Amino acid sequence: MRTLIENGTVIAWDGSRHHVLEPGVLVFEGNEIVHVGTDYAGAADTVIDAAGRLVIPGFVNSHLHLTDTPFTKGHQEDVGSRSGPSNTQNYNALYKMLPAVRKASEPEDQYAGAQCSVAELLLSGSTTIVELGYDYEIGGGGDIAITETIAGMIGASGIRCYTGPRYRTRYYGADDSGGVFYDDYPNGARERFEACVAFCQDWNGRYGDRLRTMLAPGQIDTCDAQLLKDTRRYADQLKIPIQLHAGQSPFEFSRVRETEGRTSVEYMMETGLLGPDFIIGHGQFMSDDGNIGSMAKHEIDALRESKTAVCHLPWVKARRGGVINSIQKYGDLGIRQCLGTDNYPLDMFHEMQTAAIVCKIVEKSSVAATCEDVFHMATVGGADALGRPDLGRLAPGCRADMVFVRIDTPRAAPVYDPFKFLVLAATAGDVDRVIVDGNTVVEQGAVLTIDVPEAVRRVNEASKRVWARMDY
Ligand SMILES: [Zn+2]
């Protein structure tokens, strides 16, 4: 079936950058875009009027967590003493709150959380999501049933997803003296790793190829070298991407140096992880001082030449008092970058605003992290990091993944520069229609594939159960 979208303003892709077609038309057949231009004289089975709308490529939200996010809302900030490590080092959230939430979440709670999160993602225009699943302690040894149930829900929702249940050699937590302890799982949780690899093999390409899998070793400081080398081996064998949490806290950076005798980037280099299919989630503390310019030349060269991508998550950093220093520096070094929301809100408009503004403040410059660059990161940046030239852009041959954003509103009018509107002013509330793989999944601001009031009711109930079990 051929669908024509007309009368809108289209953000099209010319092969190297996004550009504005006003008015623009877009035609897709099945799940593939077949024409983007200023006019179209051919036939169509369906016509969608996009008057008063920007038609943009769907966001590629390159790092997030579906299952536990709803249970941490409002609990990670304004917690702890103002003079303690919690203030500056992500301490309470990473080493106390998140392990406790994961321990207190039963499968039905995780399902409720994940479904609500997917609804939020669709409503805010993420058409491709990269979900890093829960850690070992929730799934247990080789049990992958919860992951499969949630992957089934993701498939039914109509969203496009890369999913990878996490595994690691050891876990961590806060100790009584304000530090971090590490403890190995029995047998290095080898069973869990093997179950994750089997899941990746079995589920890759399901739902008409909307669901793909990835390997997601937990965090750089919780994985031994053998596990990371095995991760690279299986990724090559299965031809799937890898994402690893790294550069999240100064504790992590010094721990890697202590136990591995090298920096985080060197550890990733020497275990063979770097490559065009490898994403570093966070990438904030890649040196002692958290300044990207402080990395050694051989580290910068390795990241750039391997085409490794760094996924930035600026809002979760900012609300805990941290900044990436900076997106502009990474860009100037020629290192690939993408953008994700991590936990809450799961809203890429909000994340783009934070990315641009934080970088401008850090660099003390209004021309750092331009709106066009940030929009590129949120779309093409993520697609390229996943090795997908058919995502994140509107051009013939690409998947029909797009979002209609209202510009017939007081907030938008007049729109001189769509990129500036999208990054500096638009909100999730401006999203009108979302199409993934040629199917409309959000229409007039409502999700068609999920009973949203019921999903909200269920997550509220689940939250009560989780917090009743919490030991925090
Ligand atoms: Zn994360």
Image (tube, grey):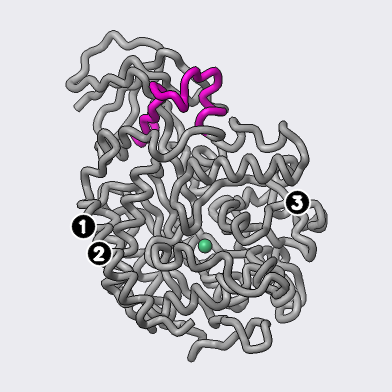
Residue 301, numbered circle? 3
**Residue 458 in the image: x percent, y percent?**
25, 64
Label disc, if present, on residue 63 of the rendered structure? none
- Disc assigned to residue 454: 1
For residue 190, say whether it is visible: yes
Residue behind label 1 places its C-beta within 8 angstroms of ligand 1: no
Q: Quadrant of the N terminus?
A: top left
Residue drawn at x 60%, y 82% as measured from the top left: 174
Spatial separation of the CA atoms under disc 1 and disc 3: 50 Å
- Three-letter amino acid code at the position of disc 3: Asp
Q: CA distance from mark 3 to mark 2?
A: 48 Å
* Horizontal side of residue 91 vs 443, given as left or right: right
Q: Quadrant of residue 94?
A: bottom right
The residue at the point 68 percent across, 54 percent down is 323
* Within-10-Å neighbours for mark 2: few <14, some 14–19, many 20+: some
Callout 2: SS: helix
Q: Quadrant of residue 369?
A: top right
Magenta-highlighted residues: 397-422
Given contact means CB atoms under 8 Å apart, are the residues at marks 2 and 1 in contact? yes
Q: Secondary structure at mark 3?
A: helix
- Left or right position of 196 against 416: left
Give whichever of 197, 339 is nearer the camera. 339
Q: Earlier in the sequence, mark 3 or mark 2?
A: 3
Which is more N-terminal, label 3 or label 1? 3
Residue 458: give its label.
Answer: 2
Question: Measured from the top left, where is residue 464 in percent x and y?
Answer: 32, 73
Q: Seen in the image, is 68 located left or right of residue 359?
A: left
Q: Position of residue 393 (x, y in %)?
A: 45, 32
Q: Residues within 10 Å of mark 1 (few under 14, many from 20)?
A: few
Q: Nearer the viewer, residue 349 or 64?
A: 349
- For mark 3, does the 10 Å Cα neighbourhood hold few (<14), some (14 to 19), or many (20 or more) residues? some
Question: Where does the image place residue 309, in percent across and percent down from the top left?
Answer: 60, 50
